[in-house]
Amino acid sequence: MKLLSATSTLLLLKGAMSQDCPAELTQSTSLSIADGSTLTFKYAVVLSGFTDSQNLLCAQLERDAEGFIGFGISPTGEMSGGEAIIGIPDDADDNPGTVMKYNLSGDSPRTSLMSNDKQTLMHTNITQADGNTFMTFAKYLNEIEENEIFASGDNTFLYALGEQGKGLSFHGNNRGDFTLDFEVTRKPTSYSTTLEPTFGGVYVAPGLARTMMPTGQGRDRDEPSPTSPPAPTPDIRTPPVVPTPDTPTPDTRTPDAPTPDAPTPDAPTPDTPTPDTPTPDALSGATIRKKIGTMILGAGAVAVWFGM
């Protein structure tokens, strides 16, 4: 079984995910050529939804004369160190018409055909009709070991035009360079989502690493413990104090009314027997007699008891 090289595998993957050029190229720029003809460069830049390596330049070059068309990419504006896409019309039986990639050099030979693994152009075509020449192609903006074409920013391109019926030959004065900015930037994808930097109502500062919490919200693992943001203090304004006019307060005091002297009934006091306590020099005559009689009776009772 024959193994595919890394480059061949990359080309197959690119072909599987290749972008489509629009049916009509609406942007263009026109250049005046030394021989009096005009070269019109129509273009569109198509950004990939997968990776920047799939971004495309879709191009069509139209010339109101016949002959080969060369389109080059060179940051310096010189042939040396650049690459070119050259379309040779089918103006001979042994040349059905080709659009291929070439390396450019400042020395002879000025052009050399790239190897087959570098021939990554798509949608290539070159035709001549009614004295006009049309070349179309699609090229990846960024390819290995080639000058990058920028979707946004200045690009320096080369052009060279040949004469009818001479194939790939010296271009003479029908050459030059021009600068063009496609001004294409990637738009945010509609399916991109950003987790709210909150968890359970607690603020979490946004960061690169997130951990899915049970609530489905995100929390940054690389950051300190979440803290709540300061709640805005409501603007409670105290109404101004309105002075109240002094209102005389009526004297509600009750005049002192004379209180009649009500007789208080004497509460009966229960008789509590009090033992007789002799008080010197205070006994009455009756009391003394009673005491003496009691003593006599007592003595008689004693005598009777002993006599028995």
Image (tube, rainbow, N blue to C red):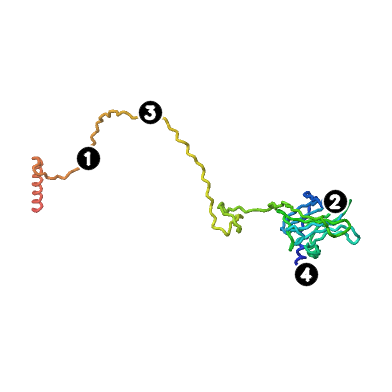
Q: Where is the N terminus found, in terms of image quarters?
A: bottom right
| The furthest residue to the right | 93
Amino acid type, label 1: Pro
First reached walking from the N terminus: tag 3 or tag 1:
3
**Alpha carbon of mark 1 to alpha carbon of mark 4: how far?**
136 Å
In-image side of 195 versus 83 (left or right): left
Query: Can I make out residue 14 in this image?
Result: no
The location of residue 263, given as percent across then percent down, is: 24, 31
Amino acid type, label 3: Pro
Among the 4 quarters of the image, the one containing residue 146: bottom right
Closer to the camera: disc 3 or disc 2? Answer: 2
Mark drawn on residue 248: 3
First reached walking from the N terminus: tag 4 or tag 2:
4
Among the 4 quarters of the image, the one containing residue 176: bottom right
Label 1, secondary structure: give it.
loop
Residue at 54%, 57% in the rendered image? 225
**Alpha carbon of mark 3 to alpha carbon of mark 1: how far?**
60 Å
**Alpha carbon of mark 4 to alpha carbon of mark 3: how far?**
112 Å
Label 4, secondary structure: give it.
loop
In-image side of 125 versus 215 (left or right): right
First reached walking from the N terminus: tag 2 or tag 1:
2
Among the 4 quarters of the image, the one containing residue 294: top left
Q: Which residue is mark 2?
A: 64
Query: For mark 3, does the 10 Å Cα neighbourhood hold few (<14), some (14 to 19), or many (20 or more) residues?
Result: few
Q: Which residue is mark 4?
A: 3
User: In the rendered structure, are the residues bearing label 1 and label 4 in contact, judged by CB atoms less than 8 Å apart?
Assistant: no
In-image side of 305 versus 267 (left or right): left
Mark drawn on residue 270: 1
